[in-house]
């Protein structure tokens, strides 16, 4: 097993659940919330669906961030993380072009790679993206700017990556200012700028993260995806490894997902 703060797909459901419980304990500042009963059934379902632990951890982190900003002072329970975990997983699948996971065979994986494969696809949305309620652009930008600012001050962030973070902070601050008084199509136009900024962050992370950290993250990405290696065509496999490595590096460095 590699660095426990990253992830690798374990060999059995019990180990999968233990690692989810460990991560939930960390985000709850050491307060242990046992995954039992309905919670265990939920996590077991994630394991049986083949959801990589990296997606589970990111979903928990996203929910925990909002939980800390709210009124509740109780520890976060795993049951409340389900929408975020599913949303992160669905976003990851769409990014690599797989509409059904795990695909039944290589032919299905190839079919899933077509541009229209995930068009109209629906998944369990995160609470902020519930039907009839659009995610708050301002809150999302505030969180992203805050995380980029904190990450750029870390001692394990290289100079080029710090410079990239500073540049992206400037771009997001400008969008945040512009978003203050706009609605409708004008706000959507601002949202449409986020994927390109997120792609710039991804490129910087993959190129300028510390070499040893990149090595460990890629090893964990390969372990995460190993159960599905034979089911993915080479192009989808390489894209999956890249995207998963990017996500693991961001998680380790405290960097946000900027796309919304």
Image (cartoon, rainbow, N blue to C red):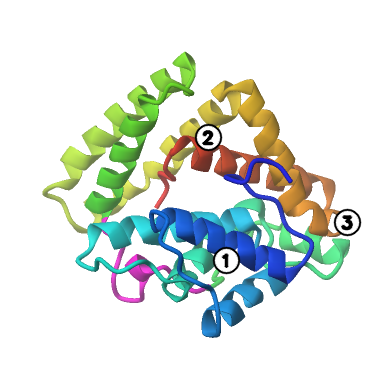
Q: Left or right: 66 with respect to 230?
A: left
Nearer the N terminus, badge 2 or badge 1? Answer: 1
Return the residue nearer the eye: 114 or 216: 216
Q: Left or right: 10 with respect to 27?
A: right
At horizontal 31% and vertical 62% (from top left) the residue drawn is 67
Q: Position of residue 257 (x, y in %)?
A: 44, 45
231 in the magenta segment: no
User: Which residue is situated farthest in the bottom direction here?
Assistant: 37
Nearer the N terminus, badge 3 or badge 2? Answer: 2
Q: Give the distance between the C-alpha atoms of the residues marked 3 and 2, in whole angstroms.
A: 26 Å
At horizontal 70% and vertical 30% (from top left) the residue drawn is 215
Q: Quadrant of residue 107?
A: bottom right
Circles 1 and 3, Cβ within 8 Å, touching? The answer is no
Q: Which numbered dot is residue 230?
A: 3
Q: Position of residue 136 (x, y in %)?
A: 26, 58
Give the main secondary structure, helix, strand or loop, of the magenta stretch.
Answer: loop
Q: Which residue is mark 2?
A: 202
Circles 3 and 2, Cβ within 8 Å, touching? The answer is no
Query: Can residue 68 be spotted in the picture?
Result: yes
Q: Position of residue 238 (x, y in %)?
A: 75, 42
Q: Position of residue 186 (x, y in %)?
A: 23, 50
At mark 1, the secondary structure is loop
Disc 3: CA contacts within 10 A as few (<14), some (14-19) or many (>=20): few
Disc 2: CA contacts within 10 A as few (<14), some (14-19) or many (>=20): many
Magenta region, residue range: 123-136
Q: Which numbered dot is residue 152?
A: none
At horizontal 38% and vertical 54% (from top left) the residue drawn is 29
Q: Give the distance between the C-alpha atoms of the residues marked 1 and 3, in whole angstroms.
A: 25 Å
Q: Which residue is mark 1?
A: 119
Return the residue nearer the eye: 223 or 38: 38
């Amino acid at each position: 097993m590699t660095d426990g703060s990253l992830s690798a797909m374990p060999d059995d459901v019990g180990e999968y659940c233990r690692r989810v419980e460990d991560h939930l304990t960390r985000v709850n500042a050491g307060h242990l919330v046992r995954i039992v009963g309905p919670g265990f059934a939920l996590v077991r379902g994630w394991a049986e669906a083949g959801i990589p632990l990296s997606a589970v951890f990111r979903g928990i982190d996203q929910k925990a961030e909002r939980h800390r900003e709210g009124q509740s002072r109780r520890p976060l329970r795993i049951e409340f993380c389900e929408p975020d975990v599913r949303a992160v997983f669905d976003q990851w699948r769409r990014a690599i072009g797989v509409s059904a996971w795990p695909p039944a065979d290589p032919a299905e994986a190839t079919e899933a790679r077509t541009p229209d494969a995930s068009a109209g696809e629906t998944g369990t949305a995160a609470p902020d993206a519930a039907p009839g309620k659009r995610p708050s652009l301002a809150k999302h930008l505030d969180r992203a700017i805050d995380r980029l600012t904190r990450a750029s001050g870390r001692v394990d962030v290289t100079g080029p990556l710090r410079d990239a973070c500073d540049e992206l902070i400037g771009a997001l601050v400008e969008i945040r200012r512009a978003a203050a008084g706009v609605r409708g199509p004008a706000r959507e136009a601002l949202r449409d700028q986020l994927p390109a900024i997120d792609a710039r962050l991804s490129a910087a992370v993959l190129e300028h993260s510390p070499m040893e950290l990149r090595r460990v993250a890629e090893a964990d990405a390969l372990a995460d995806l190993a159960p599905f290696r034979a089911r993915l065509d080479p192009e989808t496999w390489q894209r999956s490894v890249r995207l998963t490595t990017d996500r693991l590096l961001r998680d380790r460095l405290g960097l946000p997902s900027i796309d919304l």
